[in-house]
Image (cartoon, rainbow, N blue to C red):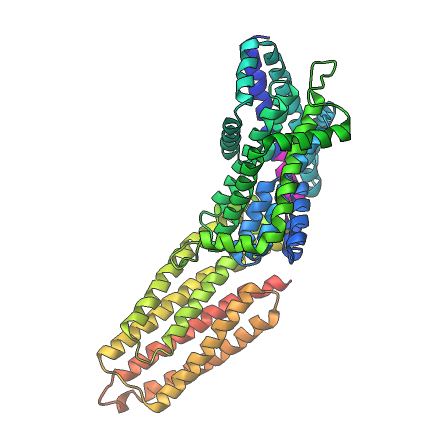
Amino acid sequence: MDLFSIILKIFGGLGLFLLGMQLLSDGMKKVAGSRMRRIIEMFTNKPIIGVITGALVTSVIQSSSGTTVMTVGFVNAGVMNLVQAIGIIMGANIGTTMTAQLIAFRIESLAPLAIGIGSFGYLFWSKKKIKNWMMVLLGFGILFFGMATMSSGLSPLKDDPHMMELFRKFSHSPILGLLIGTILTCIVQSSSATIGMLQALVGSGLVDFQGAVPILLGDNIGTTITAQLAALNANTNAKRVAMFHTLFNAIGAVLILIFLPYFIDIVSLVTFKIIGKPFDFVDANGYHPSALRYVANAHSIFNITCTLVYLPFVKPLAWLVTKIIPDRLQRKARLSHVDKSMEVIPSIALNQAINEVERMSRLVKEMYSEMDGFFRSLDSSTIEAIKEKEEELNSLYRDLITFIIDLNQQPLDTKELNTIPGLIHTVNDLERVGDHIINLSELTERMEKQNIKFSEETIGDMEHMYALVGQMTELAQKLIIKPEKNYLAMRIIEIEGKVDSMEDTMRDKYVTLRNCQEDHPEINAFIIEGIMNLERIGDHFKNIASALKPLEN
C-alpha cells in the first residue's frame, strides 16, 4: 500500500470514528438527556452516591464532557454545591472508561449491520424516540467501522523500519507522550475519541504499552478543557468545579507517571489474569487484539484508583479549590447562569435560562427595596447603586432574550417548549419594571432639589401602595422559580387589583386637592407621577403572573 493510500485510510477512518462518537453521544443525550439531568439532581447528596451517579450517567450518554458540562451548569445555577459536584466529576471519569472497554471487544464485524439498520431507521422512521435510538445505533456502527478503517490504514506502517524506529523513540519519552495526549484531547475535546485512536495504534503494533500509558494519561488531562470552556462565563463555584476536574486528572496523571513502571506492571498483571494473553499477542492477521484491552484497563484502573484516593478528601479538596479561586463580585457578569455550551443539552440550557430570569427578578427586588418608598430622600450613592443595577438588568435583558430565542429552536419536549413564551414575556416585563423603578428614583432626586415634602396622610397612602407592590415583587420571584405554584400567580393578580383600586382612589383624591396646594401646587403632580409608576409596576407583575400561570398545565 502506498503512502497516500495509508494516509487516506487513516484520515478517513479517524473522521468516521469521530463522527460515530458524536452521533452516539448526541443520540444518547436525546434519548436520556432530561432523565439524566433529573438523576444527577436527585442522587448527589453524598460524595460516594455522586461518584456512582456520575459513572452511571457518563456510561449511558458516552460522554464525560457532557456530564461535566451538566455539572458545571448545575453548580452555576445553584442546584448543586461544590462537594456534590466533585463526586459527580470523579464518577464521570470512571464512566468515560466504558467507551474504551466497549471498543476493546472488537465487534466491528457488526458495524455494517448497525449502520444499515441505523441509517434506514433514522431516515424513514417518523417517531422521534425511535429516530433517536436509530441515531445511537448509527453512531455505534460508524464508530466501529471507522476504528476498523483506521486500524487497517495503520497496520502497514509496522513493516516500515523507519516508522517503527520513530514510534520506538517516541514510546520511550513519557513526558512527550503526556504532552501529545494532552494537546490532542484539548483539540478534539474528547478523551474517549483520543483513547480510541490510541487503541488503534496499539492494535496495529505501532505503540507498545510503555508508550501508550503516558499518552493515555495526557488524554485524561486534555479532556478537562471542556469543563474549563463551559465555566468561562459561569460563576465562581462553577469555575471551581472546572478547576477541580483539571487538578484531579493532572495530579493523578503526574503521580502515575512518576511510578509508571509499577503502574504498568499492575495493569499488565490484572489484564493477563482476566484475558490470559500478553499485550504483544498477535492474531493470524498480524493484529494485537489484547492490546486494546490493556489500554482500556489502564484507563479504568487509573480513574478508579484516583477516585478511591481522592474520595475521603472531598471536603478538603473543595476547600482547596475555594482558596485557589476566591469569591469575586459577580455583579457585572452577563448571563452568569448560562452559556452557549449548555445548548448541547437543551433541557439543561432551559433550566439555566430559568435561573437567569430569577436572577433578573432578584435584581428588580434589590432595586425596589433600595427605594424604601419613592417619597423618602435617597442619598446619591443609593441612587447610583439603583442605576448600576438597572444597567445590569438591561444587559441581562439583551443577552437573555437572544439566548431564549435561540433555545426555542432546540429539540425540547412539549412541556419544555411551552415554557419559552412565558419566559420571554417575563424577561420583557422585568426589564420594564426596572425602567419604572428608575423613574421613581429620578422623581426622588427632583423632589430633593425642589424641597418637596409630603403630608403624613400622603406618606401613609404611598407607604400602603408601595408595600403592596413590594409584596408582588417577592411573589413574582418565587413564581419564576416554581411556576407550578398556581396560588402565587393568583395572589399577584389579586394584589394588582388592590393596587389598581388604590391608584384610582388616590388619583381622584389628589387631582381634586390640586387647587388647595397653593404653596406647592406641583406636589400633586409628583404624587400622580409616583402612583402611576407604582401602578405600572403592578401591571407588569400581573403580566408575569398571567404568562407563567399556564405552565402548571
Is most of the magenta stretch helix, strand or loop? helix
In the depicted structure, whether residue 469 falls above or below residue 508:
above
Q: In which quarter of the image is the C terminus?
A: bottom right
Q: In this view, does 373 lie to the left or right of 131?
A: left
* Residue stretch in magenta: 23-33
Q: In this view, does 325 lie to the left or right of 303?
A: left
State the image coordinates of residue 14 (x, y, percent, origin top left): 58, 24
State the image coordinates of residue 217 (x, y, percent, origin top left): 57, 34
Q: Which of 519 and 40 is in front in this view?
A: 40
Q: Which of 133 and 529 is in front in this view?
A: 133
Residue 28 is a magenta residue:
yes
Going 50% across and 66% down the picture, which residue do you hit? 544
Q: Is residue 3 left or right of residue 146?
A: left
Going 56% across and 22% down the picture, which residue do you hit? 171
In the depicted structure, whether residue 208 falls above or below residue 389:
above
The answer to which image quadrant residue 521 occupies is bottom left
Q: Residue furthest top?
A: 2
The answer to which image quadrant residue 101 occupies is top right
State the image coordinates of residue 453 (x, y, percent, origin top left): 28, 85
Residue 491 is a magenta residue:
no
State the image coordinates of residue 126 (x, y, percent, origin top left): 69, 39
Going 69% across and 17% down the picture, which residue do you hit? 287
Q: Nearer the viewer, residue 328 or 26?
A: 328
The answer to which image quadrant residue 152 occupies is top right
Q: In which quarter of the image is the N terminus?
A: top right
Q: Is residue 197 visible?
A: no
Going 56% across and 29% down the picture, which residue do you hit? 215
Q: Is residue 448 visible?
A: yes
Q: Which of 164 and 26 is in front in this view?
A: 164
